[in-house]
Amino acid sequence: GAVVSQHPSWVICKSGTSVKIECRSLDFQATTMFWYRQFPKQSLMLMATSNEGSKATYEQGVEKDKFLINHASLTLSTLTVTSAHPEDSSFYICSARGTSGRAVGYNEQFFGPGTRLTVL
Amino acid sequence: GESVGLHLPTLSVQEGDNSIINCAYSNSASDYFIWYKQESGKGPQFIIDIRSNMDKRQGQRVTVLLNKTVKHLSLQIAATQPGDSAVYFCAENTNDYKLSFGAGTTVTVRA
């Protein structure tokens, strides 16, 4: 149980284009999803918190107009990198927090496999 | 701001030996901690967690120790195997269910 998927697993795009990354909770409902960015040999940095049916909350320094987040259902959140540039190349990882069971009391987040974005 | 950090960035261990990975945290208000394992090119994988009202928790081959007095967290892996080679992160529960990750320790298992 508690499986989170991401699509695509990797993407290469030209500078100036937009890229959409999907995050799905496959076997549980996620009221909250989180988006992280990870540069090579670095830790995960939280970009934003996505709550179903409401606007995402962005961390300081993250441009909300550049990284558009939509959480339209309890099992799907999307991150769109608009007008991507080479400095946006990174490993984007989502996580989902469940609505019931052990996850409620323990804030256990289940992570997706990540999406490698390369902007040329 | 306060954040979670690590004592050592790399750890080399002989197969079969025990591994100890350390983590220091600075937010005394943190009440929940998690250890994650991340293999190259993959997302973090949950290993074990511990709440602040505990000082020790054991799982399969892993033990997490929490010392709130010195704000220190450790992960012990028994009988380390080649498949344990990965980057290990400690994460700290802050507010609004956000997790703050440490820098990570790269564990390399020698055959």
Image: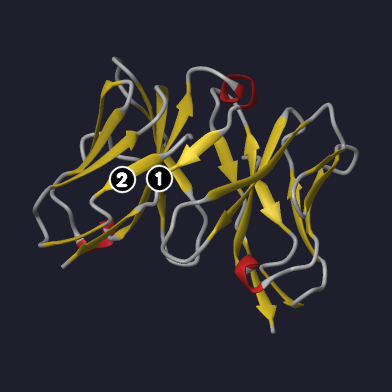
The picture quadrant where one finds residue A73 is: top left
Residue type, mark 1 in image: Gly
Q: Position of residue A118 (x, y in %)?
A: 23, 63
Q: Is residue B110 left or right of residue B73?
A: left
Q: Position of residue B9 (x, y in %)?
A: 66, 68
Q: Position of residue B85 (x, y in %)?
A: 61, 70
| Residue beneath the point at 74% across and 77% down | B15
| Residue beneath the point at 25% across and 35% down | A78
Q: Which residue is mark 1?
A: A112
Specify whether disc 2 shares its chain with disc 1: yes
Residue type, mark 2 in image: Gln
Image disc number at residue A42: none
Q: Residues within 10 Å of mark 1 (few under 14, many from 20)?
A: many
Q: Which residue is mark 2?
A: A6
- Contact (CB < 8 A) between labels 2 and 1? yes
Residue B79, relative to residue B5: is it above or below? below
- Residue B84 versus residue A117: which sits nearer the camera? B84
Please report, as a chain letter, where disc 1 is located.
Answer: A
Q: Is residue B72 left or right of residue B42?
A: right
Please report, as a chain letter, where disc 2 is located.
Answer: A
Q: Quadrant of the N terminus of chain B?
A: top right
Q: Quadrant of the C terminus of chain B?
A: bottom right
The picture quadrant where one finds residue B82 is: bottom right
Residue B109, relative to residue A2: is it above or below? below
